[in-house]
Image: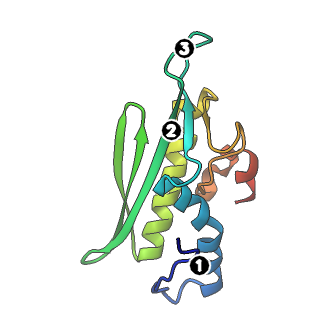
Amino acid sequence: MPDHVHMMILIPPKYAVSQVIGYIKARARSIWLVSTGRGSAISWDSTSGPEGDAGVVEISARIFLTIEKEDHWQCEYEIDWPNGVRKKKAYGIDSVQSLLIAVQLIGIEIYTSEAHRSGKLMWQAHGDGYGFPLPSGIRDLYEGNDKSL
């Protein structure tokens, strides 16, 4: 099994190379683990009490390759909630921006979900965050290790 990935990305001049690479390195492992199902997935404790029989349900998030359109870039993503798959698209002026927005939208959806508000959603440990960044305006929602994002 390979221990690394080779990739080529175009970084527009308005982004510092070190900033983009730092972001990719910081998030790649957690995003890869969750999106491929090869590591800890976010889970939802859907038991309704001591006699609940639904148990713990995994919530998977998948992020697809960015696609160049005529005047913008698009990044599709999916979140597998217990009540169905939610498919969305994020748009940006370049591939990096569309990917960043997709990852942030996943974070927004997770942090504003009823499952999160009820305390039944967790990634590695309850209250430790989910490994997805949020836009600056709502970072007060962060919990645990996510506060360092």
Residue 50 at what x, y percent from top left?
62, 11
Q: Could you tell me which residue is drawn at 58 percent across and 42 percent down?
A: 111
Q: Nearer the viewer, residue 74 or 21?
A: 21
Judged from the image, the secondary structure of the residue bearing numbered disc 3 is loop
Residue lying at the far top in this picture: please name it. 51
Q: What's under tag 3, amino acid-wise?
A: Gly
Q: Disc 3 marks which residue?
A: 52
Residue 112 in the figure: left or right of residue 131: left
Viewer-closest of 64 and 75: 64
Determine crowd level at label 1: few under 14, some 14-19, many 20+ residues with C-alpha closer than 10 A: some
Give the number of the disc on residue 20. 1
Residue type for callout 2: Glu
Q: Position of residue 140 (x, y in %)?
A: 69, 47
Amino acid marked by disc 1: Val
Q: Which residue is pictured at 33% across the width and 49% down the height? A: 87
The mark nearer the N terminus, 1 or 2, is: 1
Image location of residue 97, percent across then percent down: 47, 71
> Which residue in the protein does label 2 denote?
58
Asked whether the residues under the numbered discs 3 and 1 touch, taking CB atoms below 8 Å apart as contact, a structural biologist would say no
Q: Determine the secondary structure under disc 1.
A: helix
Would you call the spot at circle 3 few (<14 residues within 10 Å), some (14-19), or many (20 or more)? few
User: Residue at point 37% right, 71% down?
Assistant: 66
Nearer-N-terminus badge (3/2): 3
For this orientation, the residue located farthest to the left is 70
